[in-house]
Image (cartoon, rainbow, N blue to C red):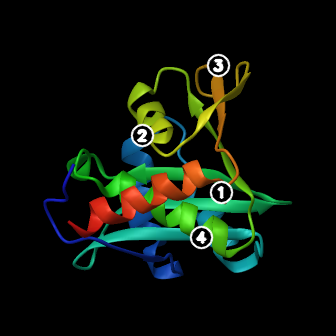
Amino acid sequence: MALTARVRVEPMTLGDVAAVHEIERLSFATPWPAHAFEQELRGNRLARYVVARAGEQVVGFAGLWLMVDEGHVTTFGVHPDWRRQGIGRQLLLNLAELSIAIGARRMTLEVRVSNEAAQALYRGFGFDLAGRRARYYTDDGEDALVMTTPALDDPRMREILATERERLTR
């Protein structure tokens, strides 16, 4: 899917927290509090967070932690008005490239069992089902699927990332 607006992905700053929190609030039943993002940006040396901007407006965000040798996706959201425009793909590609840059060997994440759209996006980036966490989500007790990629230097992953880079430049 092509972007309908020019969007750039860049590191999240403290000035982005209010906009990111608003996307969280619109997207999730139990959003992270704004102070959690502030703490992550100020004090978690293992964390990396990015935002997607259309002009000056923050329209999406994503974050990961380097956990030993895995880029673990901690949060990911696109403003409801900006969904289905390729922004999630752009954010996920950025997280994959960031994971490689910080020395991760693979990526992992948890996703709601009911979130089939997100699962499809993740599968398109090479994520496969690795397990299930029972009653993972505290708001409703829904299970989470654990998904992981093959090694990021695996030829299959290099091809997926190259295809996504090419898609975004078109």
Q: Which class describes the residues within 10 Å of circle 2: few (<14), some (14-19), or many (20+)?
A: some
Q: Is residue 74 above or below residue 57?
A: above
Image side of residue 165 versus residue 32, left or right: left
Residue under circle 1? Answer: 152
Image mark count: 4
Residue 151, image x, y percentages = 70, 51
Q: Give how far apart the Cα atoms at labels 4 and 2 are.
A: 18 Å
Which is in the foreground here, disc 1 or disc 4? 1
Q: Which class describes the residues within 10 Å of circle 4: few (<14), some (14-19), or many (20+)?
A: some
Which is in the foreground here, disc 3 or disc 1? 1
Looking at marks 3 and 1 on the same chain, the residue that comes earlier in the sequence is marked by: 3
Residue 101, image x, y percentages = 65, 75
Q: Give how far apart the Cα atoms at labels 3 and 1 are.
A: 32 Å
Residue under circle 3? Answer: 141
Q: Are marks 4 and 3 in contact (CB under 8 Å)?
A: no
Looking at marks 4 and 3 on the same chain, the residue that comes earlier in the sequence is marked by: 4
Q: SS class of the residue under badge 2?
A: helix
**Amino acid type indicated by mark 4:** Leu
The residue under the point 64% across, 44% down is 149
